[in-house]
Image (cartoon, rainbow, N blue to C red):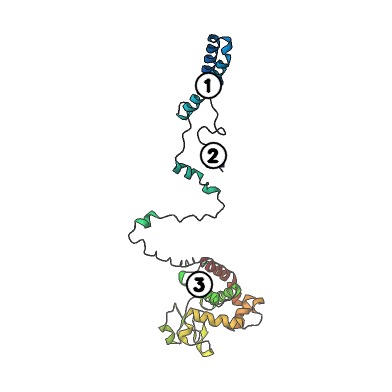
Amino acid sequence: MPDDRTLDQQSAPGDPVDRSDDTPSSGRFAAVRSATTYARLLAPGPARARIALAAGVLCCLGLTAVAQGAGNGSADPVPAAAPSALAERAEPDPASRDAERVPAAPASPTRAADPDATTPAPRRTARKPVDPTPVVGLDGAQMDNAEAIVRTGRKMEMPRRALVIAVATAMQESNLYNVASGVLPESRNYPHQGIGWDHDSVGLFQQRSSSGWGEVGQLMDPEFATRQFLAALARVPGWQQMRLTDAAQAVQISAYPEHYAKHEWRATKVVEAVLEAGQ
């Protein structure tokens, strides 16, 4: 902080505290000594009293002249600061204040010059997740179906292990394509990516409407089909500790229960890719 005396206690010209007279004492009383000596030489002995009185008067006159000269600027007087300047300098340095300072928000020149500056800025839309790049030899349609399975499983708050089981099962049942049935012409009225001939099995998981999995149009919807599969998996006791192929077989009741195992590593890679792309 600056010295408080420098800012707040400005001394007036001639203040003995802050100023020193640069005039040598020999010069200051030179005229007095010369006058006294001259008077002593001219005056007779009995007139010494009058000489002393005259010397005293001359000394007083000399001091008065010196003081007047200092007051009139002849001895380099210190200029007095203007009242407004003193008021500004007496104000403490803002950086040393203990009071909390809130910085003002900087003005935006672009917005200030804009006549429509009062118009609220448009809200930013949420970033759309990037579509995952196909992995482990899948094409775009297969990857889209895998993404639908993972997205649905996450909505159901199923663990990652369940997502891997679901993708591996769809790889075995339909090669991850949404397949219609040649036996059920109705199924071809819905978006599909191929036609199968395994009884009335349709969709990603080849679920059968005749077995109570749902209506044909519902089973052709990848999200609905996934919900049906994961809901059935969640009802299998201890599925979390089972081998993947055993957990899938407990839901599907396939004639080839061991075939699901061969898809586990690929399903794991696909689920990882989809989850990473969705972050």
Tag 3 or tag 2, which sits nearer the N-term?
A: 2
Q: Give residue 66's position: percent from left, percent from top.
A: 50, 25
User: Residue 6 got which mark?
Assistant: 2
Query: Which secondary structure lies at badge 2?
Result: helix
Give percent across and percent down for residue 210: 51, 90
The label number, if any, that marks residue 147 in the structure image: 3
Residue type, mark 2 in image: Thr
Q: Nearer the viewer, residue 81 or 218?
A: 81
- Residue 275 appearing in the image: yes
Q: Would you place residue 119 above or below residue 155 in this image? A: above
Q: Amino acid at mark 1?
A: Val
The x, y position of residue 124, in whole percent, is 43, 65
Secondary element under disc 1, as helix, strand or loop, is: helix
Tell me how far mark 1 sits from mark 2, CA to CA. Answer: 40 Å
Look at label 3 and name its amino acid.
Glu
Position in image of residue 23 (x %, y %): 53, 23
Q: Quadrant of residue 46?
A: top right
Q: Residues within 10 Å of mark 2 (few under 14, many from 20)?
A: few
Give the mark, 3 or 1, whose residue is nearer the N terminus.
1
Q: Identify the residue at image location x=62%, y=77%.
A: 245
Which of the two marks, 3 or 1, is nearer to us in this view?
Answer: 1
Residues tagged 1 and 2 counted as in contact (Cβ below 8 A): no
Of the two numbered discs 1 and 2 in the rendering, the one whose residue sits closer to the viewer: 1
Q: Which residue is mark 1?
A: 57
Relative horizontal placement of residue 107, taking residue 154 as reference (left or right):
left
Residue 241 versus residue 18 in the image, above or below = below
Label 3: how many residues lie within 10 Å, few (<14), some (14-19) or many (20+)? many
The N terminus lies in which quarter of the figure?
Answer: top right
Q: Nearer the viewer, residue 52 or 75?
A: 52
- How many numbered circles does the render carry? 3
Pick the residue in front: 221 or 47.
47
